[in-house]
Amino acid sequence: MAAPMGSTDGGGMGDARELTITDDFMFGSVFSDLELCKGLLEIILGTTIASVERAELQEPLAAGSLSRAGIVDLLVRDEEGNAYDVEMQNEVRQPYLVRRARYYGSLVDTAILDRGASFGDLRDRVVIFICADDPFGLGYKRYNFRNVCLQDGELQMCDGSEFVFVNARGVRGDSTPSLDALLGYLADDDIVESDYVNRVDQAVRTRRADPKWRRNLMLWSQKYRDDFARARMEGRDLGLEEGREEGRKKGLEEGRQEGREEGRQQAVSDLSLLAQKLDDSGRSSELSQAIRDPERLDALLGEFGIK
């Protein structure tokens, strides 16, 4: 699928001139074009959308100051205010994927309903995961989920909520030539007779060849490194809570400061080591996913013996 993310000038993670549409940064950059984004949604959902008004990249969402935040790949709003969260999922059979989808859906709902607004103002919301492999193992090209009554399968809640999992290597289920062309492109970078896929591929090639875009990729990669270090530092702070409590009992405020500094330094060290090991394994594209998913991050750290 996606080639490793990174610098074009050496010393980075991979080569930006080899990235495909399945890379997080390439995906977001290409589909920030409102017309291409509109086409993507129409092909996946099999419906017509009048217009797309906004497509926000790497949008951080949180339900509250004490709640876990999420960073969605692409948050889209159409002219009616309906919301679409589109996620590129490169990892095969990621644990808790459906629970992640559930949480992202709740975050989007919170983001699109203004404080004091009526529940009747809550617009429809669709969470879409474009998966490199089959998330459920049944071979369908796409899996659509809505809330239905267990006693009467034809009775739907009609709450405006839907989850769609696209299987890039699917072989079963209803489809269209446009969807088949898109899946082929996502799975193997294949170009077939499709005007839409040709336009997407041209957008990818244009970005690969643009030195300014590649520099922006380097900056984005560095931002992820910083975010990773910050996340790890917070985790280390929690892990050092007992030590800080002991310091408080002794009246030693400097113990708290030392603990935070230790966490910060360790986070940077962990990041550098993990990035290097992923790069050596040809898996550097997994870093961006891990930063946004603590379970996946912990799994990678454990896999490579980084504690």
Image (cartoon, rainbow, N blue to C red):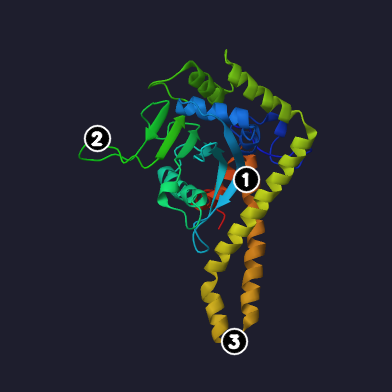
Which residue sits at x=71%, y=40%? 217
Position of 175 with respect to 38 (left or right) is: left
Position of 9 with respect to 257 (left or right) is: right
**Position of residue 263 measured from the top left corner of the image (x, y, whole percent):** 62, 65
Reply above or below: 103 against 116.
above
If you read the primary sequence from the N terminus, does the residue marked by circle 2 or circle 1 appear first? 2
If you read the primary sequence from the N terminus, does the residue marked by circle 3 or circle 2 appear first? 2
**Position of residue 77 measured from the top left corner of the image (x, y, whole percent):** 55, 39
Q: Please identify the quadrant where the C terminus is shown.
A: bottom right
Residue that mark 1 sits on = 277
Reply above or below: 64 against 161.
below
Position of 80 with respect to 214 (left or right) is: left
Of residues 209 and 80, the one nearer the viewer is: 80
Distance between the Cα atoms at labels 3 and 1?
41 Å
Which residue sits at x=66%, y=57%? 269
- Whether pointer 3 and pointer 1 mark residues with C-beta atoms closer than 8 Å, the reply is no
If you read the primary sequence from the N terminus, does the residue marked by circle 3 or circle 1 appear first? 3
**Position of residue 205 measured from the top left corner of the image (x, y, whole percent):** 70, 25
Q: Secondary structure at mark 1?
A: helix
Q: Residues within 10 Å of mark 1 (few under 14, many from 20)?
A: some
Can residue 230 be seen by looking at this rendering?
yes
Q: Which mark is residue 185?
A: none
Amino acid bearing label 2: Gly
Which residue sits at x=71%, y=34%? 16
Distance between the Cα atoms at labels 3 and 2?
63 Å
Q: Residues within 10 Å of mark 2 (few under 14, many from 20)?
A: few
Between circles 2 and 1, the one closer to the viewer is 2
Of residues 160 and 206, the one nearer the viewer is: 160
Q: Which mark is residue 251?
A: 3
Amino acid bearing label 3: Gly
